[in-house]
Amino acid sequence: MASDGQTLWVADYFNGDIVQVDIDGGLSTVTTFELDLQGPEGIALDQNGKLLVVEVGASRLSRIEDLSSGEITVLADGFNFFDGFLPIFPPYWFFDGVTVGPSGDIYVTGGGERVIYKIRANKVR
């Protein structure tokens, strides 16, 4: 999940979608964006308000440029994420996530290697 305080985004691991919940005065509007992401787990907002998504099924970190159009940019790939779970069950042993530091550097967990990857802000595609 990720939030900017007024909107909540949730990744649907099995469908590859992003669900957006807009909260306005106590009323909620839910929109599902069908993006065909591959096993999205962790999501976070970058410093420009774009969604970053850890795609475990594709071993990559992607940035959603525009939810409506489905435009996605791959920022980094080749990660070693943990994939030791049964295909019919959600991954619950490890959860690979992403966060953004104050400097704009991006940190991605790599459960397969038990590491934290750091992507410097000036190295992002």
Image (tube, rainbow, N blue to C red):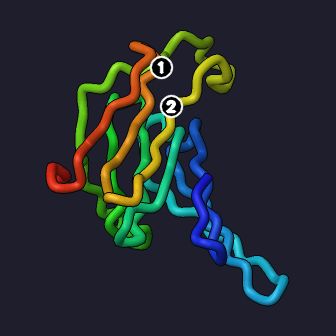
Instruction: Residue 18: name its quadrant.
Output: bottom right
Residue 39 picture location, percent across and down? 49, 35
Which one is nearer the viewer's eye here, 84 or 4?
4
What separation in Å lies between label 2 and label 1 (alpha carbons)? 6 Å
Instruction: Residue 84: name its quadrant.
Output: top right
Q: Residues within 10 Å of mark 1 (few under 14, many from 20)?
A: some
- Tag 2–tag 1 contact (CB < 8 Å): yes
Which residue shows up at 59% across the image and 21% down it? 94
Instruction: Please name the residue that numbered disc 1 is placed on.
Output: 111
For mark 2, give the secondary structure: loop
Which residue shows up at 30% across the image and 37% down it? 118
Which residue shows up at 80% across the image and 89% down it? 25
Q: Which label belongs to residue 103?
A: none
**Residue 44 relative to residue 19: left or right:** left
Which residue shows up at 49% across the image and 16% down it? 83
Residue 46 picture location, percent across and down? 39, 61
Question: Please, what is the three-letter code of the amino acid marked with disc 2?
Answer: Asp
**Residue 63 relative to residue 86: left or right:** left
Q: In the rendered image of this protein, does residue 87 appear above or below residue 33?
A: above
